[in-house]
Image (cartoon, rainbow, N blue to C red):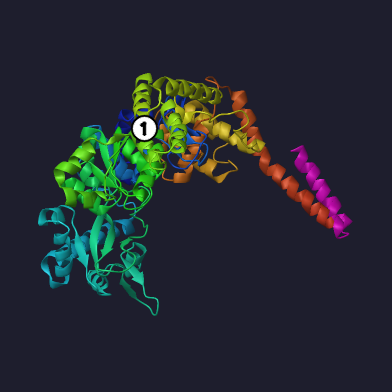
Amino acid sequence: MVTGQGGIPDDVIESVLARNDIVDTVSKYVQLSKQGKYMKGLCPFHSEKTPSFTVTPDRQIFYCYGCGKGGNSIKFRMEIEGYSFPEAVRIMAEESDIALPEGQGSPSHAVPVNPEKERLYEAYELCSKLYHFLLKNTQHGQEAMAYLRSRGFNDKLIDQFGLGFAPDRWDTLVQFLGKREFDLLEMEKGGLLSARQDRDGYVDKFRNRIMFPIHDRNGRVIAFAGRILGEGQPKYLNSPESLLFNKSRTLYNLHQAKTSVRKQRQIILCEGYGDVISTWEAGFQNVVATMGTSLTEQQISVMKSMAEEVIVSYDGDRAGLNAAMKVLPMLENAGLKVRIALLGDGLDPDDYYRKYGGDRYRHVLENAAASTKFKLIYLKKNHILLEEQGKIAYTREALPVIAELSSSTEREVYLRELATELQLSYESLKQDCNLLRQSMQKMNEHGDNPDKRWNNGRHKKGQIAAPALLPAYHAAERRLLSLMLQDEEAARYVGEHLGEAFNIEDHAAIAAYLYAYYAQNKPPDPSRFMSSLHDDRLEKTVSSISMMENPQEWNVQVLDDCIREVLKYPKQKQIAEKKEEMMKAERSGDFLRAAQIASEIIALERQ
């Protein structure tokens, strides 16, 4: 059986691509709008205001003109989820009910793409088990166990979340990993150990801390968070980023929550580990956390792929409200429905649950405030409503929030609440709101997508930079490869008349891969061809070239013109070098040598 990347059979790869349409795949993470034969949206891989992320349905590829990432649906899942090629294929195959062959061809039996990564997976799994054992079964963990008990963590929860303890010693992991013949330098790079400051050797990264293992979405331990036992700073210490751990893409507890999230199409988002565990104990298994860090676009993309609604359950203090207010537009701009859990007394979810119990906490989550309601509550806290100036200032801030609602019914509900609360005329508030809406619509008239506020005002005149003009030979090479990707006959003609004599190294490599691809009697298909490549840079280049517009029909004259331009460049380069050499000879007074070079230049120009 023919195998492709990572020992995976080609027919499996092709089936995965056939059943995972690029638009369907990308739309789970990116809000796309149709523009001609393309679909466009804001790139999930870098921050941007002008949509440069483009999906081409007929060629089954994506490409971002901003950051240069591109590829097929498998490549997109690799980039967005941080999967290796075998992982992405296996997961997509399972989702599409594609049977994976047992044995050597199966992704699970493929040669690891990165052996160091596999050793780190093994080390983290072993260390997680060690920390858990030390917490539950040794004298080292007694104080930590007593603390967890005082916080309401029972054995079931401790086992469910794999909590552990790192003793107050310098060499627990050093010895443990060393005896198992792990490379300690690799373990340091992977975030488990630290290099000694005073002399050669290593020490444990985590000491005297309650350990929270952090998993990837497939359930493998990829990092730790350690909470100090007693006083000290920092209170929480996270593993550094490594081959396994990218905190911008990781959501704590997603591996356990994903089934419930997909079933309910809803996520409860917390900030801390204890908050997740308490929310889980309260009966919500669709809970994840950002691990105390700011919410990122990548994390939002992961949530968007699994859910339609996010309930934000952050701390009930001012800092928590500010954080919720900050993430609200980020989530809404991604097309997610958002509600905010309103916890009183300035408590975090963990403390709230421990103080008031599961029933009350469940009531708070189930009755979380709609985003507009929360915005109004948040704004209200800045004003003293017993004073006239406070009422006026609050009204000025509240009306734009209500005015941006597209539903007239929703606007009426909030306007009537506002009128009752402030003892103002509903009609006057409605009139001011309508004037505001008219003003907002005028401001959006120049937007390119009036039906979708997230994408409005992006393509204003003069804001998009013109693409850089390529040298003639470079443009000719791209044109040839573009035609070769679309037509086997074109590729055969170029192979006979140019071969691999492309001037740009990546173009020559792509041409070589194309000749081999067609030699296997495979049809023209940019998405399928990309899966035969083994180089990230080449995939990006192919994605970029595939976006070029070409006429449906081509002729030999077009190919010949491009080939001539490609072959001409080395001589043009040689002539330029000769002219530089001639000028140097003239400057040094060697006029005889300059005359000889001039003759060589004339001969080259005739060629």
Count of numbered circles in the view: 1
Question: Is 355 located above or below residue 482 in the figure?
Answer: below
Q: Position of residue 580 (x, y in %)?
A: 78, 52
Q: Residue at x 45, y 28 (%)?
A: 453
Q: On the rendered structure, is 567 left or right of 80?
A: right
Task: Please identify the quarter of the rendering in which residue 575 is found.
Answer: top right
Q: Quadrant of the C terminus?
A: top right
Find the magenta span and give its range: 586-607
At a point 68% along the width and 38% down the height, the residue shown is 568
Q: Position of residue 471 (x, y in %)?
A: 66, 38
Compare residues 71 and 154 and report the one nearer the observer. 154
Residue 511 seen in render: yes
Tell which residue pokes out farthest to the front in this image: 387
Based on the picture, tell me whether residue 597 belongs to the magenta stretch.
yes
Picture residue at 35% right of the left edge, 69% below the top: 194
Magenta stretch, main secondary structure, is helix
Q: Which quadrant is the N terminus positioned in?
A: top left
